[in-house]
Amino acid sequence: MPAPYDCIVVGAGHNGLICACYLAKAGRKVLVLERRPVVGGAVCTEEIVPGYKFDVGSSAHIMFRSTPIMEELELAAHGLEYFEMDPWAFYPVPGKALGISFHRSLEKTCESIAQVSTRDAAAYRDFINRFRELNEGVFETFLKAPKPGSIFGTIFRRNLFNARSRRVWSSLDTTRQLMTNYGRLIDETFESEEVRAALYWLAAQSGPPPEEIATGDLVGWQAMIHKHGAWRAKGGSGALTQALARCLRAMGGEGGSGSRCKPARGRRTRRGRSRRRAMCRRLSGCSIRHWSRRNSNGASITCAWATASV
Ligand SMILES: Cc1cc2nc3c(=O)[nH]c(=O)nc-3n(C[C@H](O)[C@H](O)[C@H](O)COP(=O)(O)OP(=O)(O)OC[C@H]3O[C@@H](n4cnc5c(N)ncnc54)[C@H](O)[C@@H]3O)c2cc1C
């Protein structure tokens, strides 16, 4: 039987699921379509070898625990539980019976680095304090509704009330460090091969190679791990998306797997405005009848009506 939806979310990765949950919480009727048989995208845990579950993509969660999402969506009530890892990273030094441990505590981390190089221990402390200031501003912006220029507003406000922030943000060297690649930033800041190797490895977790331009902050971002910690979900990273799916269902949202939405070409409407049709034209097991509508408040909605057998 046809069901009217206010919103259809294509893809049940954790970002899609979180959006869907907030839309459902705001009273929208939501359908989430996912092409894979399991929800979660790269945040899923699957039994790849019988009897053993693996995180298919992401494993450690850092930013998520610092947002209000878990509390606002009451995900603990849907079975989500986190454990902090402390230390959160360890680099065994080849040929020596020691290793560098990265703890939540900056001081403990510096003590560990000092086993290898006292100069690098001091350099690491300065580096983290500097990038902490930068990334606190960036993270504050992440927590707000995205608007053009909102990062500048946040930085401006921080600079207005905080002399240290003003010093860091107004330095030309800050711009240079952000715009350079992380390989260069690490090499110029640290002297020992061991500390460099550990930091290359940590920065590379974000994806781009060390020579990629404007990736300086990929190594600076770990200042936020010292601030917020690194966490693992009980049962694997997929526990997050499973809890989100349960939360969505509890709020009346619906979801289906095995449904691949194909992009459609833009077309010109009768009013003459070029309107890109919503992404899903033909769905396996789900046909969309109407595309763009306005709800009772006059707001436009993504996909209005779906006959879903998912
Ligand atoms: C190997 C690996 C390790 C990682 N480790 C970490 C980590 O430890 N910590 C961390 O924070 N991040 C990590 N990440 C990054 C993190 O997993 C991703 O940034 C995150 O999963 C992106 O989420 P998303 O919801 O935006 O997209 P995705 O997870 O990619 O989800 C998109 C979903 O949409 C579905 N989809 C796409 N197109 C269609 C379509 N046309 N129709 C229907 N469905 C569709 C896909 O099947 C998928 O399920 C890692 C990533 C990888 C690949």
Image (cartoon, rainbow, N blue to C red):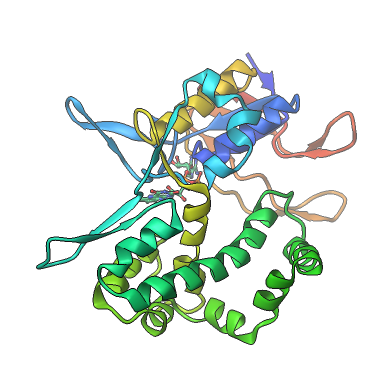
Of all residues, the one furthest to the top in this rendering is 1
Q: Single out the residue that lies furthest toward the left.
A: 95
Task: Judge left or right: residue 253 versus residue 80.
Answer: right
Q: In which quarter of the image is the N terminus?
A: top right
Q: Residue at x 64, y 86 (%)?
A: 172
Vertical side of 25 occupied by 181: above or below? below
303 vs 216, left or right, is right
Residue at the image point whose x is 33% and y is 74% from the top: 118
Query: In terms of depth relative to the viewer, which is nearer, 248 or 206?
Result: 206
Residue at 34% over, 62% down: 111
**In terms of depth relative to the viewer, which is nearer, 149 or 304?**
149
Residue 162 seen: yes
Instruction: Give residue 79's position: percent from left, percent from top.
Output: 47, 20
Nearer the observer, 207 or 24: 207
Q: Residue extending furthest right?
A: 297
Q: Position of residue 34 (x, y in %)?
A: 48, 34
Q: Residue 240's x, y, as percent? A: 46, 32
* Image quadrant in which you'd find residue 167: bottom right
- Would you say residue 261 is visible in this rendering? no
Q: How many labels does the image show?
A: 0
Q: In this view, does 116 lie to the left or right of 200?
A: left
Q: In which quarter of the image is residue 99?
A: bottom left
Q: Which of 255 and 273 is in front in this view?
A: 255
Q: Which residue is drawn at 37% across and 45% down?
A: 86
- What x and y, as percent, mark residue 225? 47, 53
